[in-house]
Amino acid sequence: MPSISDTIETAFDLSYLEFPKYPPTEIKTIGILGGGTAGYLAALALKKLHPNIKTSVIESSKIPVIGVGESTTTEIVPFLHRTLGIDPGEFFRAVEPTLKLGIRFDWGDPKDSHFNFNFFAGHQQESYYYEQSINNANWASVLMDNNKVPVVRQKDGSLLSLLPSIPFSYHIDNKNLIRFLNSLLKQRQIPIIDAEVVKVNLDEKEFVTSLETDDGQKLSFDLYIDCSGFRSRVLGQALKTEFIPFNSTLINNRALTFDMPNKGEIGVHTRCSTMDNGWCWTIPMRQENHYGYVHSTQYCDEETAVKEARAKYGHFDKYKMVEFRSGRHKQAWNKNVFGLGNAYGFVEPLESTAIQTAVHSIMTLCKLMPNNHQDHSSIAGINQEIAVTWDTFRWFLGIHYKFNNKLDTPYWKWCRENTNIGDAKVVVDLFKQRPPLVSSNFGTNSPYTALEALVFNSYSYDTLLYGQKVIPHDFKKPKMSKAEYEARVASYHALTKNALSLRELFDGDHLFEDGILEHLFEEQDTWIVETEA
């Protein structure tokens, strides 16, 4: 007769609940139309997570990839180095990213210079109550204001890295990233077909039967992933999938992009600065800064945009105008086509969502991969997950425009009066009633299923609303006393005095010579391991 301890062990045995994360499928071949960041990341993910599917990339060397600096969110770090298994050392040597602790917003109240949006939890309620600012809410924010990273020089001269505990993301030069990912596809034996698709063939049910190329090939797959960018060659043009515009929330449709020398200083944050007719990003690279004046052609022509940007940042000769539209297609998966990246939709550059949304869509596809094209429940789940996520990002970004009082130009007056924040209104109303939202973990107005929201959650809404001073008049006193709060802030500043700048970190090659990078990704007790999808 079994003992009590044996029966208890059996009663609590949950080993049979360990289901495979990535379900098997009858889909055997996938063709990805378009390289670029989204296409290459999708190919690498499918090769890694669904190795039985033969995945190929079709791209034309005649069609240029939009090459601007990329600012990312924290999801990219575990996705690249854990999910895809990309060696951090190879990545840093080849791509030369810089570290991003968050976003500095020159935004909100005209009496304030800025507020910080970072990836680390902090005491925002206390910071706002005692200082009417959230910029001392946590150590990461103080690091941002002092342009330092969480690597501290100790009294004996050795370095102590706290990167395992302080979430960060990357600033990436897109040209370097594309070159690196392309070489990685070749290393992992993922076929790349250099050809331009000139015709998409459909059957009587409007399923894609083949892609015809300019060199006479007829390429057929079980599933087609459209990564053709804003052209949306298959999902949009061939299948005529309905497009849902976001222009009642996001009216910008063009970005003026240019580069300027960084004069030896490498920033640790993306900077978003309010402009007369939109806003401008500053993305710091190792040798230069990448800029993008995002604006609406309803309020600003090219000459005006260039003149305003030069007046603020100095003279530049070379620039590009990048046109875009905000919105998404009604379905990501339609017939036997899956739209990804800009081919499916685009919100706008604010909050660095381009790669984040691509990663989310890739992981949703891999985790909910349908068994076949008759698996309507899985397809519906994929479509709902992705659509709701994009709509959540739309409403979240809308809050930036609705409550930014920095300038009183016609553009910003229109935004404050007319921006549709949709489902986020209930979040704003609750914040006004009982801040902070994080106290009740309310603020992610999206029923995520396959993936949890890592960035745009209740703390993120708190940051935006405190930062723009959207607060009730009867703001309650926090439990933490002023003396306790000031002691915490003093500790942040004391620690920051001994922290390194990014220039010091890179020039001393400390990531490699001091083993910081190796330790960061070998250690298991880190935010990177905890947040892997």
Image: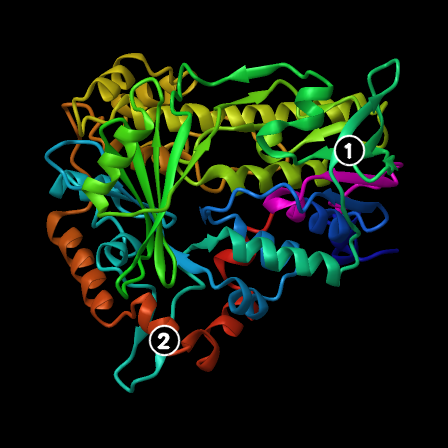
Q: Is residue 28 magenta?
A: yes
Mark 2: few, some, or many residues within 10 Å (few <14, many ≥20)? few
Between the residue at mark 2 and the residue at mark 1, the CA separation in whole angstroms equals 45 Å
Residue depicted at 41% across the width and 64% down the height: 163
The image shows residue 181, relative to residue 297, as above or below, that is: below
Q: Secondary structure at mark 2?
A: helix
Q: How many marks?
A: 2
Are the two marked residues, 2 and 1, in contact with CB atoms closer than 8 angstroms?
Answer: no
Residue 342, image quadrant? top right
Mark 1: which secondary structure? strand
Q: Nearer the viewer, residue 20 or 62?
A: 62
Residue visible at 66% across and 26% down in the picture: 332
Identity of the amino acid at label 1?
A: Tyr
Neighbours of disc 1 within 10 Å: few (<14), some (14-19), many (20+): many
Of marks 2 and 1, which one's residue comes earlier in the chain? 1
For label 1, the residue is 224
**Is residue 126 found inside the magenta-colored segment of the image?**
no
Residue at x-position 29% and y-position 70%: 500
For the residue marked with disc 2, what is the amino acid? Asp
Which residue corresponds to mark 2? 507
Magenta span covers which residues?
17-41
Q: Is residue 337 left or right of residue 27?
A: left
422 to 405, vertically: above or below = above
Left/right placement of residue 58 relative to residue 522 reads right
Q: Position of residue 124 (x, y in %)?
A: 25, 42
Question: In which quadrant of the rendered image does the N terminus lie?
Answer: bottom right
